[in-house]
Image (spheres, rainbow, N blue to C red):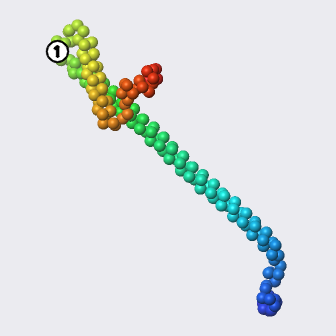
Amino acid sequence: GGNVPPNQNIDNHGNTPLQHMIDPHEVDDVENLLETYFIQVESLLTRLEALSERIDDTEDLVNIDLDNRRNQLVGLDLIVTSVTLMFTFVTSVAGIFGMNLVSGWEERRGAFLGVTALSFLVGAIITAGFLLHVRSRKLMFIPDAAAVLRTSGGNLKDF
């Protein structure tokens, strides 16, 4: 059939016809070309690894910034909660006096202003106590007045 006799594929030195057609200089050129490509690939791999590391570092920085923002929001929530605590006390006093009970206080001159001022004062004391407790437990950074004056240089316009 289509088989070529074995003696036509191999010469006297044991080489095939394909090996006679390859120039050794071309093999050197191909090796040089492959070596150049290998160097370029290694360089690209090094650059990609460095880029990957920079991306990881940037992701870590973004996560740190997000954590900082989250902590600031938690601190703001704590302050709003403490002010809510103050107004809760004030509204409970108003609710007690607004129950249409006759106590004699409703006819006194200045009673409304006195009760309102006293309830705001007590509410402010409760809020201050709450914030001092939070500060003493270091649950939130609340600077003392001396630290604020030191960092602002005595200028309180920023606060």
Q: Position of residue 18 (x, y in %)?
A: 80, 81
Q: Position of residue 120 (x, y in %)?
A: 28, 20
Q: Secondary structure at mark 1?
A: loop
| In this view, 20 is above or below 123 | below
- Kind of residue at badge 1: Val
Residue shown at the point (31%, 30%) measured from the top left: 131
Q: Position of residue 12 (x, y in %)?
A: 81, 91
Looking at the picture, tell me which residue is in the foreground, 152 or 7. 152
Assign the N terminus to one quadrant of the image.
bottom right
Report which quarter residue 135 is drawn in: top left
Q: Position of residue 151 (x, y in %)?
A: 44, 27
Report which quarter residue 3 is drawn in: bottom right
Image side of residue 23 versus residue 89, left or right: right
Q: Residues within 10 Å of mark 1 (few under 14, many from 20)?
A: few
Looking at the picture, tell me which residue is in the foreground, 150 or 55. 150
Q: Is residue 1 among the parts visible in the rendering? A: no
